[in-house]
C-alpha cells in the first residue's frame, strides 16, 4: 500500500522552487527563478516547524552573505574545466579526477541491498541544503540559436483542423473512459484509508476459498505472459496451401522483374503472401549464393513470427537457414541465408559495414509505415546502390506511398500483386460522435444482433490498450444484460489485440471458433495482421501518435485523427474474403476536411538525437545534405544537435566526440548509453550496477497488479514495499534485479509469489548479458583492476552517476507533492507507483527517466532524488547556483562571456 504523498521537503516547507518562466528571445531565452510568491506556498506549520524554518533561513542568509563577499570569479567555475560534457572522454576523465580529493577505496565488505532501506538524506548536514538553482542557456557556434525549437514551439502540426469534431474527440477523450479513471481514483483513495471500518468488515467477510481461487487465477494470468521466443521451435504454425497465395501465383513474373531491375516497388494487400513468399522466391532463384537475403520489419514481433512461418514452410530449424535478429536477441548462425530483422538492427549494421557486403539483397517490408529507421535506410540505400551495382533493393508497400518511393529511387519500377478485393459499403455518421467508445460498443452490439444468422466477424479500431480494455468490458457487460432478456442471443468472442498483450492472448484472434469474433485492435490491424473472416469494421477515426515535445525534450503519445489513407486501409479490412461494411464513427465532412491525405512520417515528428548520432558516426557531418525522402524541419535537426551537444556527444563545433562515438555503439537511448559509458569513469566505477538498471528500464511492466480484485491489489502493493529503496525507483529496480539474479531455482514461482513479471525479469537478464558483451567488445573498460567496474551497490555513487547523465530531466519541488521541470517550468507529478510517495517529506531535486502524459497531468516515471550540487556540477550547461542580488539576465551574461572565452581558446587550437 502506498503512503500518502508528503507535502513538505526536508526543510519543512514548500519554499523549494521559485516560479520558473521562460523568457522570450528578446530577453535572451533566460529562464529565471522568482522568489516573490514563496510565502503564498507555505502551508500551516506547527510552532516547531516555524522555528526550524526561521533557523534554516538564518543559516542560508549567512552562507549567501559569505558568498557575496567573494570575487566575481568565484561565482562561476572556469568553463574550460567545469563544462566537462563539452570535452572528449579523455578530458572528461581528467575532470572527474579533480573531484576525487581524498577519495577512499571502496571496501569489499559493503553490504548488498536490504529490504526497504532508506538512503541517507541528501540534504542532511549538506552545505547545499537550501541551494537555489538558476537556469541559463548557451548555444554553440555551429548552431543557429533562432532555429532551435523553443519550449512553446511544435516540431510539426499533426492536427489538420483544430476546430473540427475529430480533434475535439481526441482532446476530450471518451466520457466513459474519463469516468472510469475517476472511479479508479476513488477506489485507490478508499483503499488507502486503513481505518475504514466498513472496508475492513467487507474484507473480513470474504470467503477464504474464493480468495484463494481468485489469487490462483491472477497468478495464472501472470504465467500466460510466457517467453514467446524460447518456445518458437516447440510449435508449428498453422498449415495451409501456400500455392493459393497471390504472391506465389506470380512468382515467375516477380523473379524476372527482380533480375532485370536493381530497385523494385512491390504493392500487395495484406494477406497476399508478399512477406512470406518473396524471401523464398529469391532463395529458390539462388540469391542466397551471393550473400544473405535480408528482410526488415518495422515491428519486433513481426520479425519473429514471420521468420517462424518461413522456416516451417521451408522445413528447416529456426536459427539455421532461416533466422531473426531483433534488439538484444539474435537467433542466427553461420548457416543463415534468410535473415529477418527490425529496420533498426539493419541500420546499426551499417555502422560496421556501410556497404552491407554480406547481403545480396534487402527486402524492406511494410515500408508504407514510414518508420524513422526505414526513412534513414532509404537515404543510405540511395548512396549504396551507386557503389554496389550487384545489390538488389525490394520495397514492399500498401498502395499508399508507393509512388513516392518510386520517384525517390529514380522512378523505380512498380509491380502490383493481383488479388481480388470485394466491395465495402462506407457508412458515415450523420451527426458528430460525442463518445467514440460508447458509439463503438453500441454499433458492435447492433451489428451482432442484426446479423445473428449470418457469418462475419467484427473488427473495431481503437487508440490504445486502455480504450481497448474498456471497450471489450462494456461489450461483454451489455451483451450479458441482453442475454438475460433474450436467451436466444448468440455468443460473441470478444478479443483484444495490442502490443503489450501476452503472446498467448494475442494468438486467440487467429483461432477457429463457432462464435462470431469481435476483435478490438490498435492500428496494428490496418496492415500488419492478416485477419480472415472480417465482414464488419468499426472505425473510431483516431489513433495514438508519437510526437516530439520540445518543451519536455522527449516524445509523447497523442491521440490524433487518422489520415485518409489509413481510413481506406481500415475499411479495406472488411473486403478481403467477402463484401463488407465499414461504420465510420465520424461524418463525411470530417473525413474530407479534418484528415491529412497520408500519415505524417515518423521522421518529421520525432526526436532525432539517435538518428543524428548514427549519421555523424557514418561521417555525415552536414545533416542538412543527407538525402531524406521527406526532410525533417531545420528546427528539428538543430534542436536534436543541441541536445546531443548538451550531453557531450558533439563538441562546440558539431563534431562527434569520443563520448559520442562510444554512445552510438549501444542500441539504446543516447542518455542511457552515456550513462553506461560514464559509469566506468574513476569518479563512479559502478558499471555493473548501471547496466543492471539500464536493462530493467528496457523492459515493460516489472510489477503485476490485479485490475479487478481489491484484496489482491492490496497484497501486491504490500509486497512491492519490500523491494523499495527509499528515494529512488532506479535503485528499487536494481534491488529487484539483484534478488532475481540470486534466486537459483524456481525463479518463476518466486516471481509469482512477489507479483513480479517473470518474462520481463528474464528479458532484463538477457539484455544485461548483451550490454555487458557490447561493453567488452567495444573495449570501453579502462579499469585495470577488475573486468568491469562495480561500486558494490553504493547508493550515493549510483545516484550521482544517474544525475551526471539525466541532469536534463531534472525537476524541483514546488508544492503539495508537485514538481516543476527545471528547464521548462512545466508542472509535473510523481507517478503513483513511485517509491518517493512513501517517504514522507519529498526531496527538493529529482531526476526522472521519462514522462507519462495524460490529458490532466504529467507524471514522472522512474524517479531518483539528487543533490542540487550534482545538478550544478554535471549540468552546468543549464544550471548555476543562484546568488542573492543576481537575476537571470546577469547570470546569463556572465555565462555567455565565459563560454565565448572558451570558444575563442578552442578556435586558437584548431
Image: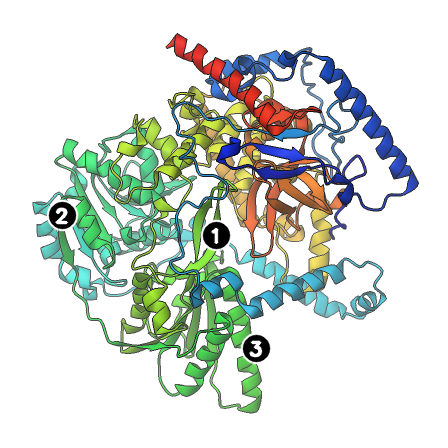
Q: Is residue 88 above or below residue 36?
A: above
**At numbered mark 1, what does the secondary structure look like: helix, strand or loop?**
strand
In the rendered structure, the answer to whether residue 271 lies left or right of residue 72 reads left
Q: Is residue 15 above or below residue 1?
A: above
Q: In the rendered structure, which disc, 3 or 2, sits on the residue that comes first in sequence? A: 2
In the rendered structure, the answer to whether residue 1 lies left or right of residue 314 reads right
Alpha carbon distance from label 1 to label 2:
35 Å
In this view of the protein, which residue sits in the foreground, 474 or 894?
A: 894
Identify the mark at residue 477; answer none if there is no mark: 3
Residue 203 in the image, given as x and y percentages of width and height: 79, 66
Q: 10 Å neighbourhood of mark 1: few (<14), some, or many (≥20)?
A: some
Alpha carbon distance from label 3 to label 2:
53 Å
Residue 202 in the image, given as x and y percentages of width and height: 79, 69
Quadrant of the snapshot with the C terminus: top left
Classify residue 9 by image quadrant. top right
Q: Nearer the observer, disc 1 or disc 3? A: 1
Q: Nearer the observer, disc 3 or disc 2? A: 2
**At numbered mark 2, what does the secondary structure look like: helix, strand or loop?**
loop
Q: In the rendered structure, which disc, 1 or 2, sits on the residue that comes first in sequence? A: 2
**In the image as oriented, which residue stretches furthest toward the front?**
26
Residue 260 in the image, given as x and y percentages of width and height: 7, 46
Q: In the rendered structure, which disc, 1 or 3, sits on the residue that comes first in sequence? A: 3
Q: 10 Å neighbourhood of mark 2: few (<14), some, or many (≥20)?
A: some
**In the image as oriented, which residue stretches furthest toward the top?**
909
Identify the mark at residue 419; answer none if there is no mark: none
**In the image as oriented, which residue stretches furthest toward the right?**
47
In the rendered structure, the answer to whether residue 490 lies left or right of residue 325 reads right
Cβ atoms under marks 1 and 3 closer than 8 Å: no
Residue identified by numbered label 1: 557
What kind of colouring is applied to the model shown? rainbow
In the rendered structure, the answer to whether residue 300 lies left or right of residue 726 reads left
Residue identified by numbered label 2: 412
Amino acid at each position: 500500500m502506498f503512503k500518502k504523498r508528503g507535502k513538505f521537503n526536508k526543510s519543512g516547507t514548500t519554499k523549494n522552487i521559485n516560479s520558473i518562466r521562460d523568457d522570450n528571445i528578446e530577453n535572451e531565452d533566460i529562464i529565471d527563478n522568482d522568489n516573490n510568491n514563496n510565502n503564498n506556498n507555505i502551508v500551516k506549520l506547527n510552532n516547531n516547524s516555524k522555528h526550524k524554518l526561521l533557523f534554516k533561513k538564518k543559516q542560508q542568509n549567512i552562507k549567501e552573505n559569505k558568498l557575496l563577499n567573494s570575487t566575481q570569479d568565484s561565482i562561476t567555475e572556469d568553463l574550460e574545466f567545469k563544462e566537462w560534457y563539452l570535452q572528449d572522454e579523455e578530458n572528461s576523465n581528467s575532470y572527474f579526477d579533480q573531484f576525487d580529493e581524498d577519495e577512499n577505496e571502496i571496501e569489499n565488505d559493503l553490504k548488498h541491498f536490504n529490504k526497504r532501506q532508506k538512503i541517507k538524506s541528501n540534504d542532511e548536514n549538506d552545505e547545499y541544503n537550501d541551494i537555489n538553482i538558476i537556469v541559463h542557456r548557451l548555444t554553440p557556434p555551429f548552431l543557429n540559436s533562432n532555429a532551435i525549437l523553443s519550449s512553446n514551439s511544435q516540431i510539426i502540426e499533426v492536427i489538420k483542423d483544430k476546430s473540427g469534431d475529430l480533434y475535439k474527440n481526441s482532446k476530450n477523450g471518451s466520457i466513459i473512459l474519463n469516468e472510469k479513471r475517476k472511479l479508479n481514483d476513488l477506489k485507490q483513495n478508499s483503499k488507502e484509508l486503513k481505518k475504514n471500518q466498513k472496508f475492513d468488515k467487507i474484507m473480513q467477510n470474504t470467503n477464504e476459498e474464493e480468495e484463494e481461487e481468485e489469487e490462483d487465477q491472477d497468478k495464472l494470468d501472470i504465467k500466460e505472459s510466457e517467453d514467446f521466443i524460447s518456445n518458437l521451435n516447440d510449435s508449428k504454425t498453422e498449415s495451409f496451401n501456400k500455392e493459393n497465395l497471390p504472391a506465389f501465383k506470380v512468382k515467375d513474373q516477380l523473379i524476372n522483374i527482380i533480375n532485370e531491375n536493381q530497385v523494385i516497388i512491390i504493392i500487395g494487400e495484406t494477406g497476399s503472401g508478399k512477406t512470406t513468399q518473396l524471401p523464398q522466391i529469391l532463395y529458390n532463384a539462388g540469391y542466397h549464393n551471393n550473400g544473405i537475403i535480408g528482410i526488415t520489419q518495422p515491428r519486433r514481433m513481426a520479425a519473429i513470427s514471420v521468420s517462424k512461418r518461413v522456416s516451417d514452410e521451408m522445413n528447416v530449424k529456426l536459427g539455421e537457414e532461416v533466422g531473426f535478429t531483433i534488439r538484444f536477441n539474435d537467433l542466427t548462425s553461420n548457416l543463415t541465408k534468410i535473415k529477418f530483422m527490425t529496420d533498426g538492427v539493419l541500420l546499426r549494421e551499417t555502422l560496421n559495414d556501410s556497404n552491407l557486403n554480406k547481403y545480396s539483397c534487402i527486402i524492406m517490408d511494410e515500408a508504407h509505415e514510414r518508420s524513422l529507421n526505414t526513412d534513414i535506410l532509404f537515404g543510405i540505400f540511395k548512396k549504396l546502390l551507386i557503389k554496389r551495382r550487384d545489390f538488389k533493393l525490394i520495397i514492399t508497400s500498401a498502395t499508399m506511398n508507393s509512388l513516392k518511393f518510386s520517384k525517390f529511387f529514380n522512378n523505380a519500377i512498380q509491380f502490383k500483386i493481383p488479388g481480388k478485393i470485394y466491395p465495402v459499403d462506407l457508412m458515415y455518421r450523420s451527426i458528430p460522435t460525442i463518445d467514440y467508445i460508447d458509439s463503438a460498443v453500441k454499433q458492435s452490439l447492433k451489428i451482432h444482433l442484426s446479423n445473428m444468422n449470418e457469418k462475419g466477424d467484427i473488427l473495431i479500431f481503437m487508440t490504445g490498450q486502455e480504450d481497448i480494455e474498456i471497450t471489450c468490458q462494456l461489450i461483454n457487460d451489455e451483451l450479458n444484460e441482453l442475454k438475460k432478456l433474450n436467451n436466444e442471443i448468440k455468443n460473441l468472442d470478444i478479443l483484444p489485440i495490442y502490443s503489450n498483450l501476452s503472446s498467448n492472448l494475442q494468438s486467440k484472434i487467429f483461432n477457429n471458433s463457432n462464435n462470431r469474433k469481435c476483435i478490438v485492435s490498435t492500428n496494428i490491424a490496418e496492415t500488419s495482421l492478416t485477419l480472415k473472416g472480417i465482414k464488419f469494421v468499426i472505425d473510431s477515426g483516431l489513433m495514438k501518435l508519437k510526437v516530439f515535445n520540445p518543451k519536455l525534450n522527449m516524445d509523447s503519445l497523442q491521440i490524433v485523427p487518422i489520415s485518409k489513407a489509413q481510413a481506406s486501409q481500415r475499411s479495406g479490412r472488411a473486403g478481403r474474403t467477402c463484401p463488407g461494411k465499414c461504420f465510420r464513427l465520424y461524418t463525411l465532412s470530417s473525413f474530407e476536411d479534418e484528415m491529412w491525405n497520408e500519415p505524417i512520417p515518423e521522421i518529421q515528428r520525432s526526436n532525432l538525437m539517435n538518428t543524428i548520432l548514427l549519421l555523424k558516426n557514418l561521417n555525415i557531418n552536414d545533416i542538412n545534405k543527407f538525402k531524406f525522402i521527406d526532410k525533417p524541419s531545420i528546427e528539428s535537426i538543430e534542436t536534436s544537435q543541441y541536445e546531443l551537444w548538451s550531453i557531450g556527444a558533439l563538441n562546440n563545433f558539431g563534431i562527434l566526440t569520443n563520448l559520442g562515438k562510444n554512445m552510438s555503439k549501444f542500441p539504446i537511448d543516447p542518455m542511457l548509453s552515456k550513462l553506461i559509458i560514464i559509469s566506468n569513469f574513476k569518479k563512479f566505477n559502478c558499471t555493473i550496477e548501471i547496466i543492471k538498471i539500464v536493462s530493467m528500464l528496457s523492459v515493460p511492466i516489472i510489477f503485476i497488479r490485479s485490475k479487478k480484485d481489491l484484496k489482491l491489489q492490496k497484497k501486491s502493493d504490500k509486497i512491492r514495499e519490500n523491494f523499495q529503496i527509499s528515494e529512488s525507483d532506479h535503485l528499487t529496480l536494481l534491488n529487484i534485479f539483484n534478488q532475481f539474479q540470486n534466486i537459483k531455482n524456481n525463479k518463476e514461482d518466486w516471481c509469482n509469489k512477489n507479483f513480479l513479471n517473470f518474462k520481463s525479469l528474464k528479458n532484463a537478464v538477457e539484455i544485461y548479458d548483451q550490454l555487458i558483451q557490447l561493453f567488452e567488445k567495444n573495449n570501453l573498460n579502462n579499469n585495470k583492476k577488475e573486468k568491469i567496474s562495480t561500486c558494490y551497490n553504493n547508493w550515493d555513487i549510483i545516484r550521482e552517476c544517474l544525475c551526471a547523465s539525466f541532469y536534463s530531466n531534472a525537476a524541483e519541488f514546488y508544492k503539495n507533492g508537485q514538481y516543476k521541470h527545471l528547464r521548462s517550468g512545466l508542472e509535473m507529478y510523481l507517478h503513483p507507483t513511485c517509491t518517493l510517495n512513501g517517504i514522507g517529506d519529498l526531496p527538493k531535486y529529482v531526476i526522472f527517466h521519462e514522462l507519462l502524459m495524460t490529458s490532466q497531468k504529467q507524471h514522472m516515471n522512474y524517479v531518483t532524488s539528487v543533490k542540487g550540487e550534482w545538478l550544478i556540477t554535471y549540468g552546468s550547461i543549464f544550471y548555476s547556483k543562484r546568488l542573492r542580488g543576481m537575476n537571470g539576465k546577469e547570470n546569463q551574461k556572465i555565462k555567455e562571456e565565459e563560454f565565448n572565452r572558451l570558444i575563442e581558446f578552442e578556435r586558437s587550437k584548431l
